[in-house]
Amino acid sequence: MNWIKKMGLLFCCFCFLKITNAQINVSFLQYLYENNLKKELQTYLWKNTLKENDTLFFERAIFGLNENNEKIFIENFNQAKNLFFQNECALNKAALFNFDKKNEWFERLDTVNLFETTKKILLTYKIVNSKNILTIDSLPNELLTSYSEMQKYRKKKSLNAVLLSLILPGLGEIYAGRKRAFFPVLLSNGFYIAQSIESISKFEVNNGLSILNLSLTGLFYVSNIYGTYYDLKKIKREKQKQFEIDTINYFGSTCQCSVH
Amino acid sequence: MKLIRLIILAVLANALCINNAIGQLNYDTLMLSLEMKVFENKNSISKHDFLWQKLELSIKNNDLPKAFESLVRLNIDSLSAASYKYYWDAAIICYLNNDENLARNYFSKFKVLNPNKLETNAQILEAIVYSNDDTARVRDLILNNDSLKPLHCLIDLAAYEKSHYAAYFITSALVPGLGNILLGEVKSGLVSLAITSGMILLTRELFKNNLPINASLWGIAWGLRFYGGNIALTDKNFDKKEVDKKNELAKSCELEVLKLFKKFSVNFLTITY
Amino acid sequence: MVRILILCLLANIMLNGFSQNRLNLNKSIAGKIVEKYPKENISKRPFLNLQNKKSIQKLNPLLYVSGGLLFFYQNLLSEQIQANCVYKNSCSEHAKICIQKYKFKGLLMGVSQFTKCSPAIVQDYPIFLKTDNGKIINELD
């Protein structure tokens, strides 16, 4: 029994030596990033027995940003907010990461101690997500083109697109922004209408060919109208997404930095 | 009591023999600790030895991409016990990770350093690694060693090309669907024939009934589409037949190579797993 | 001594038994030969997926007519014309997905995409909606 107790004690000492609360080694972290060792990085930040402090949560949040993992970022950002508010590069990276995520990160952000660039990103976020036209004096010149495109399509009405499509198939597509769809739509609808007229004039309406041609014409005509209505809604979302992407690219290039 | 002591001694002895002094059992943690050692020795030559240990551990855990990642970062000449055996192992790892150029590089270094140049399993690996790049070399190896005759399939595989493409193409152009039937795709060939003939008859009927617009859309536009599509389908089926035949040849070649491996097995020389 | 050796062997077997699948080197090397020449996989194009639909919805004849026509087209006719759609989800596949989700509106959406399908329309779409090989991403929201 004594012998077993001694072995047990040795084992416990060995384990104790192993399970220490070590501080995070930032230069080792930098080395792992430089060599692109993602698996080792993940193991180091999560499985290794490091002391759980602000620095560790901060590094984990940065890992989440780099790996485009929203869950990891949000979980650790909340516990490392202080460090983010002290590091302009990290905060800007976080702001740009959450810009198009629709996760209310900006709504929960403390706007009192923000850096200048972060304030600009926040203002741009408000411009994108507000239905009203806000003052755009502080918007950079590089973003004005995509902003004006976005506003131009926001003003367009679905009813106008539908009416234009009713008058001439394909016209509604030009209004909706799919200019190059005009000729294919016009030609296909035109051919089916001509076919139907020809078959009705040669045979009667209740002839098989006429019924087929009429049904196809009707289907294509109605689908062109509904397609235009749906396209306009889609294009409004596309223009907003384009503006978001341009914003992320612009601020991403102007605040070039390396958190790691 | 004695038995319990013996059991504990046996387990500890085994643990110490299999694992290194740290004694951790988790693969990720072991890899991290080795990487830490590489980092601590990054300016010294011993980092290569730790990278080789990482590589060995990855192989033991069947993690080939990770092993390749470690291999690319190290310099075999800087290993403390560098020998031809490491080049052999490196060539195998590169081949398994689809980097044949690097595999050939390492293999050629192995050949320069290896004193036993005529071993059959080395020749087998050489044939496999060079099969896509230098079939003449593979042919020479087979000529000089009768045991390697089954490897002739590698040369046949690399050189295989389906012939008479023009014949199928012209046949499909003359009789829609016939080219596909000759290629063995009877169903799509018959469908092409039926559709194209149907379109011709339909166009004729529509013109007879004085419906030129209907005829031009249903008959001419769609008819031409189906006719052109039939020729493109012949081309696609020809390529598909070639790919399928190569796959068949590759499978039979794999069986030949496995039979050969039963007599002359290829193994790692420095890694035990 | 013999007992220790037997116990060592048993412990070895026990420990190694719990380890991950070992690399079968010869099989892996031989297997690479076939990997370089893979067989072409023909993806199946099934009928409409009506699994999550309510029983009443499944009785709609429009579903079966349109689904049947699309099934016939995809499995028989589409290879005959060697259709190469500019959209990532081909027009027929997109129509199938739309009909499954939106029924009649979906049919209109599918036909609408089909009438617009031409190589020129790619330029009307922004870069983020295009794949690496130039196809338009047309997944439903």
Image (cartoon, coloured by chain):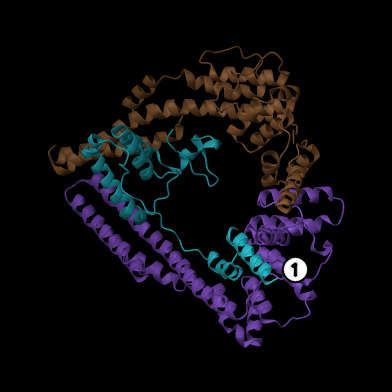
Identify which residue, A258 or A194, lies in the foreground: A258
Judge whether residue A171 can be spotted in this image: no
Where does the image place residue A22, in percent across and percent down from the top left? 77, 37
The chain holding disc 1 is: B
Judge whether residue C33 can be spotted in this image: yes
- Specify whether A191 is left or right of A254: left
What is the display colour for chain A?
A: brown
Where does the image place residue B203, in percent across and percent down from the top left? 23, 53
- The residue tagged 1 is B87
Badge 1 marks a residue whose secondary structure is helix
Identify which residue, A15 or C49, lies in the foreground: A15
Q: Residue at x 43, y 70 (%)?
A: B166
The purple-coloured chain is labelled B
Check disc 1 and give the amino acid type. Answer: Tyr
Q: Residue furthest right?
A: B44
Identify which residue, B177 or A35, lies in the foreground: A35
The cyan-coloured chain is labelled C
